[in-house]
Image (cartoon, rainbow, N blue to C red):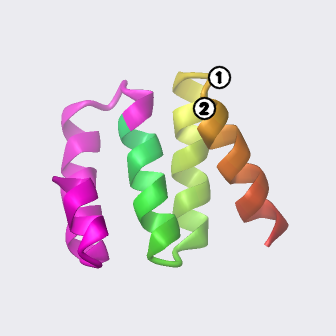
Amino acid sequence: MGYLLLEKGRNADAIAILNLNVEEYPKSANVYDSLAEAYAKDDKKQQAIANYRKSLELNPKNQNATDKLKELEQK
């Protein structure tokens, strides 16, 4: 649902849905990665960075989060 909203440009709605997902599944690295992507798309760099870091904390092998963090931290 969150990704569908992102595709439609409804970033705030997507972030709200993805935050609910984080609340329901706080130990899932994937939900933090998805939320970080939504924040990045909404130009909320610091929130994106924080969520990519949390995703990596839960799954250090998350290459997507590693790559995205490098991109965000270089901007």
Magenta region, residue range: 1-30
Circle 1 sits in a helix, a strand or a loop, which is it?
loop
Circle 2 sits in a helix, a strand or a loop, which is it?
helix
The x and y percentages for residue 53 are 61, 42
| Residue on which the image places disc 1 | 60
| Residue on which the image places disc 2 | 56
Q: Nearer the viewer, residue 5 or 21?
A: 5
Q: Residue furthest front?
A: 7
Crowding at dot 1, Cα within 10 Å, few <14 / some 14-19 / many 20+, comes out as few
Pick the quarter of the image with the C terminus.
bottom right
In the depicted structure, whether residue 59 falls above or below residue 55: above
Crowding at dot 2, Cα within 10 Å, few <14 / some 14-19 / many 20+, comes out as many
The x and y percentages for residue 21 are 22, 43
Identity of the amino acid at label 1? Pro
Q: How far apart are marks 2 and 1 (CA)?
A: 5 Å
Q: Do the residues labelled 2 and 1 touch (CB within 8 Å)?
A: yes
User: In the drawing, what numbered circle is on residue 73?
Assistant: none
Quadrant location of residue 61? top right
Identity of the amino acid at label 2? Leu
In the depicted structure, whether residue 11 falls above or below residue 57: below
Quadrant location of residue 15? bottom left
From the viewer's perspective, is 28 left or right of 41?
left
The x and y percentages for residue 36 are 48, 54
From the viewer's perspective, is 7 left or right of 65?
left
Residue 17 within the segment the image draws in magenta: yes
Q: Nearer the viewer, residue 56 or 9?
A: 9
Quadrant location of residue 7? bottom left
Residue at 52%, 74% in the rendered image: 44
Q: Which residue lies furthest to the right in this view?
A: 74
